[in-house]
Image: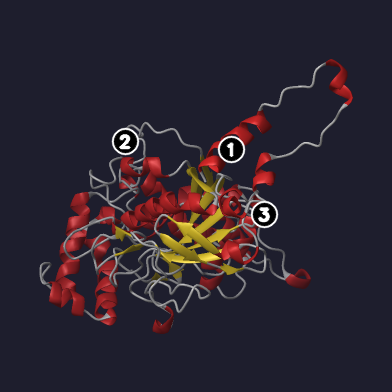
């Protein structure tokens, strides 16, 4: 082994620094040899230097333990893991060992979702801080491949790492990069986020709350996911210095919060925000409160601590548990928690108008974790990162078409816009050529729903 350790550097250096043949020997040509290819023939080095293939690619030694994976039809390998754990309404702690998610039978199964409304309880587990990692074939320890960590949307009340369209295997193969899809606690069940509800069939936004007053627990979950990924990605052939965070809707909202957390800056290189809903907050506040004189002075980014405390006090009264009574809090049923959340949602704007109607409970600028408002009221953090901000095409389509199940006549377009965004902006939309009604079938009445959907998503 001593001889081999001395021979290895010499061979690598020789391969990299070969001296040209002099004069008369130029006619001699030797086939080029990649030192790594040669060393790959040595069984003792193959596992360390060479791309993994076959069954060996399903067993990866990480700093936290052995990871067992399962093959995907696309050629990628899928690994599921528990990246952190937390008690109900408490900050999470990053995992110190590689462990399958609670409720997962083995490495071939998919991790249970976090508790959420509208699904059978059998599909979720309260111990739900897991991620699904997709690794393309052919990576080795020295690949230094980029990693994309996807944060799912769902208005902070629904969604999971295994939701429709979130299988990252094909993306991993197409880009030769590692894709990690994470999930974070949803609703108020053992979580940081208070489930709000649906209003006029439009999914509303929500934020962070625990009876003790602890805020931003979801953001801390995602930070722990990044810490975990920084530790394990090199074992799969990735680079901890090439991590991009990406998310849509509430997932983009989460990334915006990360950008305001100085302690998280070193954990990722770049960010992609798709359909960040910050503007939606302003739109629905205008619609439901009509306080146009206050519209430009209210803060519709992160929640102010004083407002959060007002909402927190109301919520604590609704659940009927003292903030220090852990037994009472742990024994609260899901039904009791959701009922309290819905009551708070309906009354939040009455408790403090700046809470708004769409996101009365949301990430809080607490001054310790989230230190910047990320708006024009204060200097931006001195961080240089590539950031891509986009809007998903027809983002509002689901909300519009679920609210209006039948075609809407063109004469209804203007009043619907007026109710949503106010008369001043509504006129700009109606006069614009960018939001046409869908032509009617067989020459019938045009359907204004398409115009409504694109108008709502395109509000500046």
Q: Residues within 10 Å of mark 2 (few under 14, many from 20)?
A: few
Return the disc, 3 or 2, that comes first in the chain's sequence: 3
Distance in Å between CA atoms under marks 3 and 2: 42 Å
Q: Residue furthest top?
A: 23
Please indicate, yes or no, whether residue 217 appears anywhere in the rendered image. yes
Q: Nearer the viewer, residue 175 or 344?
A: 175
Please indicate, yes or no, whether residue 271 appears anywhere in the rendered image. no
Q: Secondary structure at mark 1?
A: helix
Residue 427 falls left or right of residue 25? left
Q: Which residue is mark 3?
A: 174
Colouring used for the render = secondary structure
Q: Residue 90's spot in the image, x, y percent?
A: 23, 63
Q: Is residue 323 above or below residue 295?
A: below
Q: Residue at x 36, y 67 (%)?
A: 186
Distance in Å between CA atoms under marks 1 and 3: 37 Å
Q: Residue 169's spot in the image, x, y percent?
A: 61, 62
Q: Secondary structure at mark 2?
A: loop
Residue 244 falls left or right of residue 11? left
Of circles 1 and 2, the one toward us is: 1
Q: Which residue is mark 1?
A: 7
Q: Nearer the viewer, residue 190 or 3?
A: 3
Q: Which residue is mark 2?
A: 377
Q: Is residue 432 above or below residue 68?
A: above
Q: Residues within 10 Å of mark 1 (few under 14, many from 20)?
A: few
Q: Residue 366's spot in the image, x, y percent?
A: 23, 47
Of circles 3 and 2, the one toward us is: 3
Residue 35 numbered mark, or none: none
Mark 1 touches mark 2? (CB < 8 Å): no
Q: Nearer the viewer, residue 148 or 210?
A: 148
């Amino acid at each position: 082994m001593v001889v081999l350790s001395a021979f290895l550097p010499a061979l690598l250096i020789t391969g990299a620094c070969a001296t040209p043949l002099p004069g008369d020997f130029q006619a001699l040509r030797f086939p080029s040899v990649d030192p790594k290819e040669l060393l790959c023939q040595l069984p003792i080095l193959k596992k360390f230097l060479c791309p993994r293939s076959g069954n060996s690619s399903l067993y990866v030694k990480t700093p936290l333990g052995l990871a067992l994976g399962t093959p995907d039809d696309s050629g990628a390998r899928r690994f599921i893991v528990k990246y952190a754990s937390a008690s109900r309404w408490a900050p999470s702690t990053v995992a110190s060992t590689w462990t399958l998610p609670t409720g997962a039978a083995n490495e071939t199964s998919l991790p249970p979702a976090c508790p959420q409304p509208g699904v059978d309880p059998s599909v979720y587990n309260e111990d739900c801080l897991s991620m699904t990692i997709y690794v393309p074939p052919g990576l080795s320890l020295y690949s230094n491949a980029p990693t994309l960590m996807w944060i799912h949307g769902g208005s902070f009340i629904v969604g999971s790492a295994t939701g429709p369209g979130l299988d990252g295997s094909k993306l991993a193969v197409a880009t030769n990069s590692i894709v990690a899809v994470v999930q974070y606690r949803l609703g108020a069940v053992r979580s940081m986020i208070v489930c709000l509800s649906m209003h006029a069939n439009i999914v509303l936004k929500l934020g962070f709350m625990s009876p003790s007053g602890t805020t931003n627990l979801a953001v801390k979950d995602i930070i722990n996911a990044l810490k975990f990924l920084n530790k394990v990605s090199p074992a799969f052939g990735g680079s901890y210095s090439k991590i991009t965070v990406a998310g849509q809707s509430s997932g983009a909202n989460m990334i915006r919060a990360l950008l305001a957390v100085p302690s998280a800056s070193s954990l990722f290189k770049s960010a992609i925000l798709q359909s960040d809903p910050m503007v939606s907050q302003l739109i629905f506040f205008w619609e439901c409160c009509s306080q146009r004189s206050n519209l430009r002075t209210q803060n519709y980014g992160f929640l102010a601590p004083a407002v959060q405390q007002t909402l927190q006090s109301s919520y604590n009264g609704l659940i009927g548990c003292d903030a220090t009574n852990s037994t009472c809090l742990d024994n609260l049923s899901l039904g009791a928690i959701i009922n309290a959340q819905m009551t708070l949602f309906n009354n939040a704007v009455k408790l403090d108008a700046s809470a708004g109607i769409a996101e009365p409970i949301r990430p809080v600028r607490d001054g310790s974790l989230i230190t910047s408002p990320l708006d024009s009221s204060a200097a931006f953090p001195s961080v240089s990162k590539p950031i891509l901000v986009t809007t998903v095409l027809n983002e509002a389509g689901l909300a519009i078409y679920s609210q209006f199940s039948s075609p809407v006549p063109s004469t209804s377009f203007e009043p619907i816009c007026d109710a949503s965004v106010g008369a001043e902006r509504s006129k700009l939309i109606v006069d614009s050529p960018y939001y046409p009604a869908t032509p009617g079938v067989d020459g019938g009445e045009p359907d204004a729903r398409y115009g409504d959907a694109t108008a709502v998503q395109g509000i500046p």
